[in-house]
Amino acid sequence: MPHVMTVLGPVAPDSIGFTLPHEHTQISLWHIQGRWDYWELTKDEGLALDELALYRDAGGTTLVDLTLPGVGRDPLWLRRLAEQSGLHLVMGGGWYRTAYYPAEALIDKRSVDSLAEELVREATVGVGDTGVRIGILGEIGTDKPWVTAQEERVFRAVARASRRTGLAVTTHAVLSDVGAAQLTILEEEGVDPGRVVIGHQDSYPVLDHYLSLIARGASIEFDFLGMSFSAVEEHGESRVIDLLLELLHRGHADRVLLSQDVCHTSQLKRYRGNGYVYLHETFLPRLRERGVGQREIDQMTVANPRRVLTIG
Ligand SMILES: [Zn+2]
């Protein structure tokens, strides 16, 4: 039976409505060697539940948390949030990118198949002894505009796990066309590009790049929406919207996903950030002003993430 695997177990695909496919409910990025800022989305259950309630009240049903081992993944935290928020929460699996690979993952000390085996177990049995299963592979990333040797191993392991479990793969590809190289590795391993989402594509606003990924069968994700950590992010949205409209005009609404990638405490509503409701409050109204209809909005925010998350 086709299903979506949430942290509370499988649910019917048609119970998945409006979805944010690339988010975090807590994450810690500043603890690694060489990083001296204090980047984190604080792990505060009451605060997270307040923010998730605003998202649910705005019309959200589902949120995908792509925080991975090495940056704080916690299956039981997600299970508690799901129980108390009433949202469908989906947990990611795999390893993030070179700088954040946890030593205990032994990325370059065991075989690619051994890495894949661990992911298959997380998809079928659960993480450790929690019984909480992953519902997507990601966010699988590259630090730089190229794929490192270790990253290539992770992509191959993820591809093999995807083929064995049916889970989709969602990636982290910033500020360059490295998403094309990521897709090539997944293709070499036999993954159906229709099961691949190349992430953070609004950070590389190049139409030909988007069109070539879509022509290969992959989906692209604009998931830094509402971010304002850099001037380009803060003032670059009109360009992203222009490109998105061009994709819609060319009939590619079925290959675009939208999200916000909340990953810092300052992005929360409590601190006058966008919370998890930037799409509802700001971005989608801007699309409507530009003539985008509800059918296309539903395609991008409901049908596409539902398709990606559906297994079997
Ligand atoms: Zn990312």
Image (cartoon, rainbow, N blue to C red):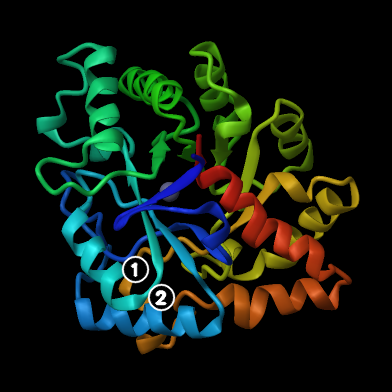
Residue 175 lies left or right of residue 122; in this view the side is: right
Q: Which mark is residue 267?
A: 2
Task: Evaluate if marks 1 and 2 touch, with contact meaning CB atoms under 8 Å apart.
Answer: yes
Label 1 and label 2: CA atoms lie apart by: 6 Å
Task: Name the residue located 28 percent from the left edge and 14 percent from the top edge.
Answer: 112
x, y percentage for residue 134? 32, 44
Could you say which quadrant of the image residue 118 lies in? top left
Residue 264 marker: 1
For the point 21% across and 44% down, the residue is 69
Viewer-nearest residue: 44 or 297: 297
Residue 259 visible here: no
* SS category of the residue bearing label 2: helix
Residue at 12% of width from left, 32% of height from top? 103
Q: Amino acid at mark 1?
A: His
Residue 243 in the image: state x and y as whole percent: 79, 53
Q: Position of residue 79 (x, y in %)?
A: 24, 62
Q: In the figure, is residue 159 to the left or right of 212? A: left
